[in-house]
Amino acid sequence: VPVMILVISYYILVYYQHPEDRSTSYFSKAVVLLGLALAMLTVLMIPFDVANQGLQFGCGQFSSICGGLLGIEWIWQILFLIVAFFIVALIPFTLFYYESFGFDNKSICRSCFSACGYQIFFTAIGVAVFLILYAFIRFTDLPVIDFEVDAQSGFQACTSTNTTCDGIVLPFDAKGAASSSAAVRIETPFLVFLPGFLGFIGWFLFAIYCGIGLVALPLELIRAFVYRPQYIPSDQYARLKLEIQRKIAELMQVGERLRESSQSGGEGSRFNPVQYMRSREERRIFNEFKQSVVELEDSYNDLKLCHENWRVYNPLIPYFKLVFGVLGAIISLLWILHTILYNLARTPYGPDGTPTSYFLNTMFTAASKEIGFTLVGTVLIGVFAFYLLFATMKGNEIFGLRFFICEIHPMKYGGTYMNSFLVNLSLLLFCIPPLIQFVATSLSEYVVVTDLDAIFGQQIRFLIFFEIFFANNVFIIMMLSVAVITLFAMLCFPNSETARRSRDMAKRLSNLENQAAESERAERQAKLKRSSEGEGAGAGATAGGEAMQQV
């Protein structure tokens, strides 16, 4: 499993990295690789925790029938401590080091010294905020139910030697029994409050990214199949290639005129309105010229893919994308339905209400117990949790840091620098604690009595102040709202990067075909015109010769 995680992390790194960073920034690449592996490993701890507990209620407390009986609470705490170290210390240092090295500063020691200064300041702020919050809101109000019984109520005590007793039994028809709800305030351990603190910040990111990814991930895979490349015959390829050569010659002439104009006009100045406006117009034309060059390069690459490079292109890839897109759509739909039926639709409304349906909890439990093979349910919860991780990655790729309208550190295929990679990695690691908490609370009936449920489903869920947001499902409603908006936007205004590249490729090839056909039609008309003019001149010369002979 660790090898598979490293391979997936390396593929993601190679897929997105900018060509200029291929032979440099090895330290930054190592941090990105380890950060991605850490995120995946932490998510894979969910099925491991479930498998370890053996899906047996009271495992290790009321019953000796357990799975592995491994105390993995400390593993959770170590993982989140490493996540916090990456977010607060390692990633900021690597980011500052990357941005300070390679320009005016070529010294490694000087870059490290500069990065340490910024990193210490950044880490001090993060640690100070954490300690202040821990000092005031580190308490958890656990809800409990008090029972008052008498000797005639049917109370049965469970002893350690009684193997037929599954716990404390209180019959529903017991007489003289009374109950009341209360809350017990306990102090949350330092290493348990840490993922709660990171998770509360990450919930704002996770609600947006996961909401977008649940819709965008399957739709983009399906669109990649719809707009897949098509093979072009040799005659059509030759004609389109000639058209590209003609457009290259035109762009070269435009570029030469722009160069001559820039040399003759000089720099624009704000104190010379005429010259300044001319300079602005030249910059606008130059930007259009660059865009035309980029589009022509894309057209040529698309054309080569549809003919010259067709032998190295695997035509099964679009069909695999279609299969995974359909499966992803099913998983996304199941997650959304489960969130509505189990997390929101409760009677009465709130965390203590009875859900309308247990949905995925029932499905996973049936897969483990009814089939008689517990590994099935463990694999299913791992697949569903891992899908949430990839949906979050997709949402981060699409939305990123567009909170202030402008695009900051975007994730682009083959065009992502290491500083953008590091920023988006820190955002992804912030989303790991809320992702795990979402799984723990949404599948609480299935992960009951696990260390995962004890940390996220009980202690973090009822932390004072944070409990207000969790009890009212603020983040879950936010996530579903983002999913609905994304679905509407992608269906009505499809502008995803993958689909846009596929549609642009088809559009460019279609435009080339139309332009080539138009050029051929113009050439035929010119030939016909020249031939008709030649025939008319020949007829006039013949008539003139006959007239001269008559004279």
Image (tube, helix red, strand yellow):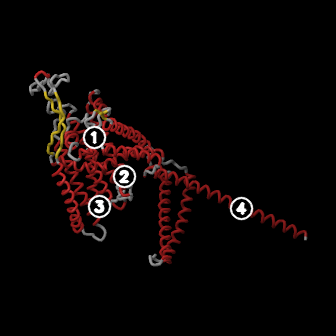
Which residue is under mark 3?
25
Amino acid at pointer 4: Lys
Residue 439 circle label: 1
Q: Looking at this view, is 140 or 66 the one in front?
A: 140
Q: Nearer the viewer, mark 2 or mark 3?
A: 2
Q: Which of marks 4 and 1 is in front?
A: 1
In this orientation, which residue lies closer to the viewer: 63 or 156?
156
Q: Determine which quarter of the picture holds residue 107.
A: bottom left
SS state under label 3? loop
- Amino acid under disc 1: Val
Q: Which residue is drawn at 53% across and 72% down?
A: 257
Question: Is 245 left, or right, of 107 in this rendering?
Answer: right
Q: Residue at x 25, y 36 (%)?
A: 352
Query: What is the x, y in percent for residue 484?
Result: 40, 44
- Kind of residue sitting beneath label 3: Ser
Identify residue for label 2.
397
**Distance Cα–Cα, label 4 vs label 3:** 63 Å
